[in-house]
Amino acid sequence: MDSLVKLVGINIKQIRKSKELTQDELAEKCGLQTSYLAGVERGDRNITLQTLEKIIVGLDVSPIHIFNFASINIDKKHLKKQEILMLLKSMIENRSEEEIRLILNIATDIFNTYK
């Protein structure tokens, strides 16, 4: 669960920055304290759905944007295994079956090469 909290926080931060909002501005729009929002963005706070809804409204995005990790832009070498798996799933889940099979074949070939 910590992985999801962290990835959602990272996404919130990236969306906020893409909309050129400061933490103070978004916190004010959401009715939250800036320090609380900062904790959310760091993945330190396990927020309620009500708080998440306030942030979604403040960012003026649909909920799917908060949970779409395919375009997450972070230094991936600091991610834990579970976070990497969530990113991989997010990257391939909307691909065609043919593309997913191709990815599986490539991964299989790579694993067989390094056995």
Image (spheres, rainbow, N blue to C red):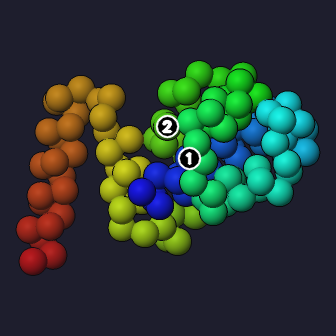
* Residue 39 against residue 27 in the figure, above or below: below
Considering depth in this image, is 54 or 73 the residue closer to the camera?
54
Percent x, y of residue 73 = 59, 51
In the rendered image, which residue does mark 2 sit on? 67
Q: Is residue 88 left or right of residue 110?
A: right
Residue at disc 1, secondary structure: helix
Which residue shows up at 46% across the image and 52% down it? 4
**Tally of numbered discs:** 2
Considering depth in this image, is 47 or 16 the residue closer to the camera?
47
Q: Is residue 52 left or right of residue 76?
A: right
Which residue shows up at 56% across the image and 36% down it? 49
* Residue 24 against residue 35 in the figure, above or below: above
Q: Quadrant of the N terminus?
A: bottom left
Furthest-bottom residue in view? 115
Percent x, y of residue 59 = 74, 29
Q: Quadrant of residue 25?
A: top right
In the rendered image, which residue does mark 1 sit on? 8
Circle 2/circle 1 CB separation < 8 Å:
yes
Residue type of the residue flagged with mark 2: Phe
Task: Specify which label sits upstream in the sequence, 2 or 1.
Answer: 1
